[in-house]
Amino acid sequence: MEPRADIAVIGLAVMGQNLILNMNDHGFTVVAYNRTTSKVDDFLANEAKGTNILGARSLAEMVALLKKPRRVMLMVKAGKPVDEFIEQLLGVLEPGDIIIDGGNSLFEDTIRRTQYVESKGLLYIGTGVSGGEEGARRGPSIMPGGSPAAWPHVKPIFQAIAAKVADGTPCCDWVGEGGAGHYVKMTHNGIEYGDMQLICEAYHLMKDGLGMTPDEMHEVFKEWNTGELDSYLIEITRDILAKKDDDGTPLVDKILDTAGQKGTGKWTVISSQEMGIPITLIAEAVYSRCVSALKDQRVKAAKAFKPGKTRFAGDRREWVHAIRQALYASKIISYTQGYMLMRAAAQQYSWHLNYGGIALMWRGGCIIRSVFLGEIKNAFDRKPKLDNLLLDPFFKKAIKGCVRNWRKVVSMAVRKGIPVPAFSTALAFFDGIRSERLPANLLQAQRDYFGAHTYERVDKPRGEFFHTNWTGTGGRVASSTYTV
Ligand code: 2AM
């Protein structure tokens, strides 16, 4: 067998198949393999018919078809199947060959696998692939991390098949070492949770606060999609609101209001807790799905605490504008928090993340693609070491322009009893981060009172710790090991 294939893809579920077809369209010779080998035959006889795609019925046959260094991409279920395939591949590949995991793996697994595969003399890439089935076929956002030495070997393929922004730049670049690619993909998914929740809150306010119909809201989202909120998620919301059921009534009204989740939003929040970074908006987005899932309890509580009138007084157009501004400001906060998280992770795991490059990768192809990400890219172009997005002049001005209406919307929602957890946590974070002095002085006093945890003083240098005998009966010894 002549080694003529550029890359092998293992896993012929829809994402794997579409990536293979995409690679084939761009002139690469791909060899396809799947645990259940009948799927290889099916694929070659149907979707891949008439293409240059090759099939393999065993890993040995697949390896024999590959040019060196061999590139093998796994598109299988995250978790054990990835480890099992890595083990099998180590038996048939050679030092210098490259194993790529394109599934939704947890970044900690990718850190471990990169070290393991490198210890065997091979190279490893864990890459986020976003954009769903359609993205995989027509141009996804691709976020690769792992062994830096592997990048030049996969770059031509990945950048060719990735989505492109208007000037032709691909939505794929090297993210960083170890698990950086999967971390950035995880953060992307967390931000996606936040963006979706923000849109849902805007919808809820327009529906219950302004009494608008889906058709009227369709018009609003259509207009929003032409400005600073122009994005894939606003666009699909516009279309969803116009969709009618078979009986001609809006389909959205017939959909049960309980949301599911697969876990990447949760992972983002868990990681933020471990890192001590407040990504409050994504956390509220995850918890909002949890609240939505408690339908039975909600039905009972709704009977116990009957809502009052939810309608906002005043001009509807002005309210719609205010809601738009509240959404925009909250979105800025969410991305600020997401970037804070990635910065902390980079420090913790010694990754060299390219923050502007990440914005560019998300600019097209993926679910959170938006005009807004172009502005984030600009902010990092202006100042590559920018440590807080809020302090960039563009975003600073944008927030200042929205803050009055943001407060107006959140306070009216609170008065009328319409839940806006993401809008309001964003505002609380904004007010917290711009507070030079927070009440944590009292908190430290409480901790010192009951646990002798000590405190620092405003009139002494940082790093000097004090303990007070608050009651006159406690000891004078400070606690240094017990932390709450
Ligand atoms: P299958 O077609 O043989 O089930 C998505 O589920 C992809 O992951 C499919 O290609 C599937 O292969 C593969 N997959 C799921 N679990 C697997 C496992 N335990 N071992 C190998 N491949 C697996």
Image (cartoon, rainbow, N blue to C red):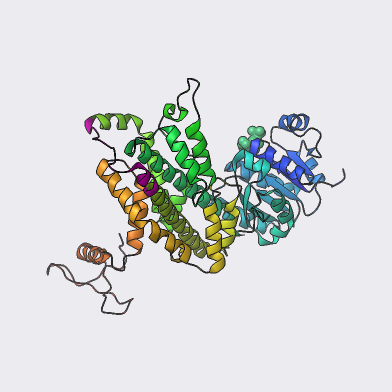
Residue 450 on image: x %, y %: 20, 62
Residue 305, magenta (yes or no): yes
Residue 477 on image: x %, y %: 22, 71
Which of the pair 310/62 is nearer the observer?
310
Can residue 266 be seen at all in this image of the molecule? no
Q: Which residue appears at 84% of the width and 47% of the height?
A: 4
Residue 472 falls left or right of residue 218: left
Residue 44, magenta (yes or no): no
**For residue 191, above or below residue 354:** above
Residue 136 on image: x %, y %: 65, 42
Q: Which residue appears at 33% of the width and 48% of the height?
A: 409
Residue 342 falls left or right of residue 476: right
Q: Please identify the quadrant where the C terminus is shown.
A: bottom left
Residue stretch rendered in magenta on the structure:
304-322
* Image quadrant, ligand 1: top right
Residue lying furthest top in this view?
247
Q: Quarter-wise, where is residue 456 in the image? A: bottom left
**For residue 214, above or below residue 64:** above
Which of the pair 150/292 is nearer the observer?
292
Residue 309 falls left or right of residue 391: left
